[in-house]
Amino acid sequence: MPGLMATREEYAKSQPLKGARIAGSLHMTIQTAVLIETLKALGADVRWASCNIFSTQDHAAAAIAAGGTPVFAYKGETLEEYWDYCHKIFEWSDGGTPNMILDDGGDATLLIHLGARAEKDLSLVDNPTNDEERVLFAQIKERVKSQPGWYSKVPTKSGCPLDSLRFG
């Protein structure tokens, strides 16, 4: 935390992250709140969801939301809410997309890349093997049908091309 505060102090005036659009998926804790505030102080536009349905500190999420950052998280959210919130971090009000993904655990990155692959072959999400996959696959199918091309536009804007990742 002292490092984040020192970074803010040293770089806030120069705005080195101006133009950065960060989709964040980390535990929504007090420490993450300081990170989010630092990213914003350095010029970034940020949207956030928790990477774990049980780790959110509701007071931290509320404080960040009160400061104007879109935060989609609360402790004990359902799997449906979790994956819905993960989608929301990629939805800017101007229709744009992030150019960075800050992702602890890889769920946000998985969502975008699996969704983009499902746009080409929807059968990839036909056979869930557990409750979480059932929810995730259903949301991907719904999004592919209601907003064709939504997933594939994110990696091209974020600098992480689809062909750079391989899935089993």
Image (spheres, rainbow, N blue to C red):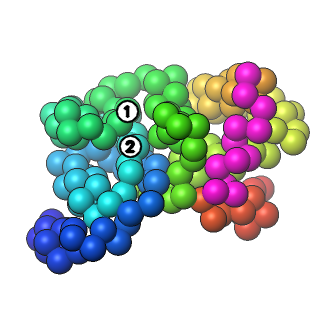
As drawn, the label of residue 72 is 1
Determine crowd level at label 2: few under 14, some 14-19, many 20+ residues with C-alpha closer than 10 A: many
The magenta region covers: 146-157
Cβ–Cβ under 8 Å for marks 1 and 2: yes
Q: Position of residue 32 (x, y in %)?
A: 25, 52
Residue drawn at the location 46% of the way across and 24% of the way down: 81
Q: Position of residue 110 (x, y in %)?
A: 62, 49
Q: Is residue 87 above or below residue 156?
A: above
Type of residue at label 1? Phe
Q: Position of residue 96 (x, y in %)?
A: 57, 44
Q: Which residue is mark 2?
A: 48
How many labels sit on residues? 2
User: Is residue 155 highlighted in magenta?
Assistant: yes
- Front one among 152 and 75: 152
- Which quadrant does the N terminus fall into? bottom left
Q: Is residue 73 above or below residue 18?
A: above
- Front one among 79 and 160: 160
Determine crowd level at label 1: few under 14, some 14-19, many 20+ residues with C-alpha closer than 10 A: many
Q: Position of residue 79 (x, y in %)?
A: 49, 26
